[in-house]
Every structure is written in C-alpha cells, then in structure tokens.
Image (tube, coloured by chain):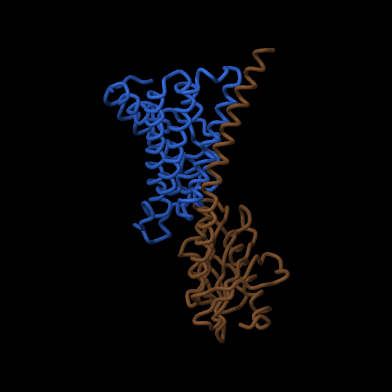
Amino acid sequence: MKHTIRSALALFIIAGAVMAALGVTHALTREAAAGQEAKQRAKVMGQVLPSASEFAAVEADNFPDFVVAAHEGFAGGVSVGFVVEVLPHGYGGPIDMMVGISSGEPGFITGVRILRHSETPGLGALAVKERFRSQFAGKELIELTVVKGSPREDEIDAIAGSTITSKAVTNGVNIAVRWYSENSERIGG
Amino acid sequence: MKKYALLIKRGLLDENPVFVQLIALCPLLAVTTSAVNAVMMGLSTAAVMLCACVAISLLRRLIPADVRIAAYVIIVSGFVTVLQLLLQAYAPPELFEALGIYIPLIVVNCILFARIESFASKNDAVASFFDALGMGLGFTLGLVVIGVIREFFGSGSVFGVEIIKDTSSHLLIMVMAPGAFFTLGVIIMLRKYFMLRKGVPHR
C-alpha cells in the first residue's frame, strides 16, 4: 500500500511539473504564434492578389458552405478584387486555401495558395507547389474541371497520383469564384 | 573524454538507429520524402531526446520502477509539446506545416524509449547527454541520407533545388512509403556487402 502511494505520488509530481512547464511555454509563445499566423495570412493575401496593397474583411452574416472568409483588396483606396478563403474537402481532410480574384472586366483568378492541408506527403501535398497552383492564375471566372494531361482553357492538369486532391483544390477555386459572382456586386466591387 | 567520443560514434555509426538498429521506421517512412523535412525531423527528435534523456537520467533515482514507463511518457510528451509550441511560434510557417503531425508523433517514437530504458535510466546525466547526442545525430544522418535519395529520384531535386526538370522521369514510388523501404534495403545491403568484404564478422 505504502509502495503504491509512493509511486502514484511520484507520477503526480512529475505530471504536475510537466504541466507547469507547458503552461509557462504556452504563455510565452502564444503571442508570437498568433503573430506568425496573422503575418502569414497577410503575406498570402498579398501573394494571391498582388495588385492590392490593403485588405478589408468582408462582413457577412453567413457565408455559403466551404467559404470561410473574404477580404476585399484595395490599391490606393480603389477596390481591385477579392481574396476568398475556402475550405474544400481534400483526401486527408479539409484544405484551407485562399483564392485571389481580380474584379476587372472581365474578372480573372489572380492566384491560389494553400494555407493548411493534410494531404499525402509527396503526392497530394504537391498541390502547394508552383507547378500545380500556377495553372489557376489568369483563368477566367468559369467553372474549372480536372483532367489528366493537356488541359484546355477551362481545365486543370491533375497532379499524378492525386486526383482527389487536384479535384478538391479546383473545387475550392470554383466555390470561391461562385461566391464572387454572386456577391461582388452587392458588396461594391 | 574518450568515453564520450565513443558514445557519439556508436550512435552515429556502429549502432546507427536507422541502418543498424532499424528502429523508428515510422517517421522514417513518413517524412523522408524530402531532404529538408528529414533534417528538421531528425534535429527535432534529437533535441527532444537530449532534453528527455538528461532529465530522466537526473531523475532516475526518484522515478519508481513500476511506474517508470508512464513517467517517461509524460516527460517526453512534455518536451515534445514545448518543442511544438516553440516551432509554431518561431519556425517558418511552411516548415511547421510540413512537419505537421510528425512532431507530436515523436512522443511515441520508439528510439526515445529505447535510449531512455537502456541507457539514460542507468547512467549519469553527462553520459546520457552524449548517448542521446550520438543517437540523435545518427537518426538525423539516417533520415537525411534516405531523404536525399528519395527526393532526388522521386522529385528530381535535392534540398528543394531542382536538378531534373523533366517530371516524366520522376519515380513516383520513391516518394511513397515503399520507396523508403527500397532505399533502406539497398543501403543496408551495401553496408553489409562492404563489411563482409572488409572481413568484419557477421553479426
């Protein structure tokens, strides 16, 4: 009995000490982590809509499914387009991505970046690479489909071995474009 | 001093966790798709191993034998979580994303428990430090060798620098789990071959 209590007590003290250390580290790194996250988001927004220099979040009571947030981009006070954050289902879970849309006449996709994903390393994870995502830039605002090899104007070349991921990312872009088409005029654009 | 140098050499070469002990294959398969991931995973594991082995060595007389595994798990997971929080706050976001789930998985990496159970819990802190350093660097070495080979054949690049631009010549299987087994198998085969030729007795 005495032995059991001694063991339990030792374990309790170790767990308490580890917990204290974790609490201290968490408190010390929380601000830096949040800052990293915000900085990363701002950087990505600038990458997907390079013509904008400032961004303002679009206020909306409810976004449609898979749309998380939208930001309107301005250059010198003039609206130049939107960055739509979407969350389509990938192969390994949701893919958090941003789609930049220029609101010129006609509008076009300015860029696509993936913020967070859990796709297969070496396969689906290749979606973050320039080679895949650069296909979207410059596309007109039409429904895109995924094909394997030699894509046409409204098609995207799939990543070899990762059709589901390719479709998910393309789907995300389509969702963003749809949101833009339905809402841009209402907001101002 | 010589004793410590030997401990490092043992982890790095004679008892290399990847090529000789064949432990910790899970992270090996998962993260060695590129050389950069391999370096970061290796160094992260080494850092956790250093902290955990020294801490456990210092506490070895205080941890009751019958709950020692539970105590080790708590201590190791504590260090892993601290590492994760630090990486989240200060490492480049792309890198933190790439390592993703594999950082928390260091907790259940058997190489840690192998070193703790067989070395740190029986030796003083300084020796444990060098043992963990040797094994950590040995693990990193193993990951990087395999990461470089897989990245080269699978993605045509080394440390992210493109060498083969023609994507049709990339061997997709090399970035998938079987590629890691093939690479590891060939390296072990070559190592044995040269050891036998040099007349090192078969173990």
Q: Residue furthest right?
A: A61
The one of B194 and B132 positioned closer to us in this rendering: B132
x, y percent for residue B110: 51, 30
Seen in the picture, residue B132 relative to B28 is either above or below; the reply is: above
* Residue at image point 40% right, 32% down: B19
Q: Where, by quadrant of the figure, is residue A72 drawn?
A: bottom right
Q: Position of residue B168 (x, y in %)?
A: 43, 59
In what quadrant of the picture does the N terminus of chain A appear? top right
> Is A67 displayed left or right of A131 in the figure?
right
Chain identifier for the brown-coloured part of the image: A
Where the C terminus of chain A falls, by quadrant?
bottom right
Count up the numbered dots: 0
The residue most toward the bottom is A105
Q: In this structure image, what is the colour of chain B?
A: blue
Name the side, left or right, on which A160 lies relative to A168.
left
Q: Residue at x 58, y 41 (%)?
A: A23
Image location of residue A69, percent across then percent down: 63, 67
User: What residue appears at the point 57 percent right and 18 percent down from the top-left corner?
Assistant: B64
The residue drawn where x is 52% and y is 60% is A127
Residue A157 image point, x, y percent: 53, 67
